[in-house]
Image: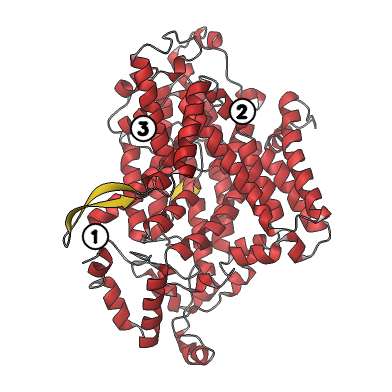
Amino acid sequence: MSTNETFSTSESELRAKQEKPELRQANQAQIKENDLVYTVDQSPPWYLAFLLGFQHYLTMLGGTLSIPVILSGPMCFGDKPLVMAEVLSTVLFCSGVVTVLQTTFGVRLPILQGGTFSFLAPTLAILSLPKFQCPSTSQVKGNSTGNVDDEEIWKIRMREVQGAIAVSSLFQIFIGFSGLIGFLLRFIGPLTVAPTITLIGLSLFHVAGEHAGNHWGISMMTIAFITLFSQFLSNVRMPFPAWKKSKGFYFARYPCFKLFPIIIAISLSWAVCGIITAAGGFPDDPKSAGYKARTDARTQVLQEAKWFRFPYPGQWGLPTVSAAGVFGMVAGVLASIIESVGDYYACARLSGASPPPKHAVNRGIGIEGIGCLLAGLVGSGNGTTSYSENIGAISITRVGSRRVLQYGGIIMVLVGILGKIGALFTTIPDPIVGGVFMVMFGIIAAVGISNLQFVDLNSSRNLFIVGVSLVMGLALPNYMNAHPKAIETGVHEIDQIITVLFKTGMAVGGMTAFLLDNTIPGTPEERGMTVWRKLITGNTDGSADKSTASIHTYDLPFGLNRLSKYKLSKYVPFIPYYPHEQAGRRQGEGETPDTPRDNPVNQWL
């Protein structure tokens, strides 16, 4: 008996009995067409859900590892692996908490939340201000107060970033729960998104070069491994031992290279570095080139790290807030919102759910804002957003269960509390990390460029907008970095706000593209808005309507869906409204009594 057949005797059977015969037949046909083992509302056995949740954790780990590494230099804890480990544990802890919140109370799709590169560009711009420049080693050692001030050096910078993320997240919370997201999307199209996302990847190339430069040979080997596994061997299924009650033990083929190319590449490169280190192939002088390729360069952190460490708000001190930091971080919030909306509809299609209604999208963006607020208060140095990589994993595993991601969130929380695990990952040699960065940042830039597929690239208007936006997003930050005191209005706070904005390439390029795209005359088809809006709403070819779940997938849990029957819900953008007294009229119009009525506040979307 297959896993899917086993489940059919439980929840799905009960739901099928409650549905009309014609709806049940349609759902059964759609399940066969989508070929999902578990759809969004179905729950695998707990042990299978745990294993699949752990798989989602491994899928997001590659991108998450890079966040504290990128922040370590500008925040002045690059030579403190224990701090790096604690920040990584905090990122995982916050990601797990927000994943559980999002899958339970938010958009209620099997979508994982994790750190985002959208916040890195404004963070680096904030930390590049003159007052946040890292002191030299001699200055730190010459300070009479010793280790206290040494710790305070990076904590001051972390608290500044915390405050910026926490306050800017209030903007995202408002955008989500007020229903304004639909209004904003009327003016944001592929010509705005393309340069914004592209500049995120391009602005981080120097970080990749710095880490890869510790040993270019190891970095190139890592890139070669990633290329081999993600491109050449992506369709190869490796045999693994498995067991079923009907078959007993057998070998099942699994697309491990397609799911975990980064993790496998890091593991192999790490093993090679370990062999070379044991053979004495790397120098043992910390000042020598190639020393950071050693696997024992930071092993001391494994002894220093605590077994259990619970991240909590204010663990680095009380967050500080500055107008410059908040304005700069809002650019990251907007980029994160746009990316997440598209992820919701993609996740719904792959998990067998109907396209998310407006109240679910609003709630999802609002919960992401709450997640960023939590991350800002706890001190991960980053926000949270939806992970596209894990959405792709659903199409491979054919498991779109919400319960699996809830288990994955719990696993991330537990890993975030276990300090030794975070410490282990910080011992990865820098050249390996540099090789991963080279690939990841290149892909981010390419994903941004791919949004231009929706616009008319034969239009001189569109070419002008894209070209000017990209050059502005590269040239202005480069000039500001070379001339940090170029802005002098006479008001220090205004100087800092303008400086941070102009140093954030994605903000400069995105704002330039936004203004040009909405002011230069052009048809919706030429701008790509027609196809873009269909993509955002999941109605490109009608495939989004072929779902295996009802609209009640997005209802609030734990009896909170009772709020939907009150007329007050009609004016709350994040709660569905089911006016049962009008069911008869709606049925005559081709709707069912359970179809949620459009919320007037949601008409923007």
> Going from the N terminus, do you reach mark 3 or mark 1 first?
1
Residue at point 63% right, 23% down?
Answer: 131
Q: Mark 2 points at which residue?
A: 206
As helix, strand or loop, the secondary structure at mark 3 comes to: helix
The image position of residue 83, as x and y in percent, is 42, 26
Distance of mark 3 from mark 2, alpha carbons?
Answer: 25 Å
Can residue 473 be spotted in the picture? yes
Name the residue beneath numbered marker 3.
Answer: 422
In the image, what residue type sits under mark 1? Answer: Pro
Q: Quadrant of residue 413?
A: top left
In this image, 445 relative to 439: left or right? right
First reached walking from the N terminus: tag 1 or tag 2: 1
Image coordinates for residue 119, horizontal then vertical, percent: 57, 41
User: In which quadrant of the rendered view does residue 414 lie?
Assistant: top left
Q: Three-letter amino acid code at disc 3?
A: Gly
Q: Mark 1 points at which residue?
A: 45
Residue at disc 2, secondary structure:
helix
Q: Which of 285 and 131 is in front in this view?
A: 285
- Which residue appears at 68% of the width and 58% of the height? 189
What separation in Å lies between label 1 and label 2 (alpha carbons)?
A: 46 Å
Residue 313 visible to an observer of this rendering: no
Give the class, few, some or many, for how many residues have Cα within 10 Å of label 3's Cα (few <14, many ≥20): many
- Which is closer to the viewer, label 3 or label 2? 2
Q: Is residue 310 above or below residue 483?
A: below
Q: Which of 303 and 573 is in front in this view?
A: 303
10 Å crowding of disc 2: few (<14), some (14-19), many (20+):
few
Residue 465 vs residue 247: left or right? right
Give amino acid for label 2: His
In percent of the image, x 28 and y 67: which residue is there?
4
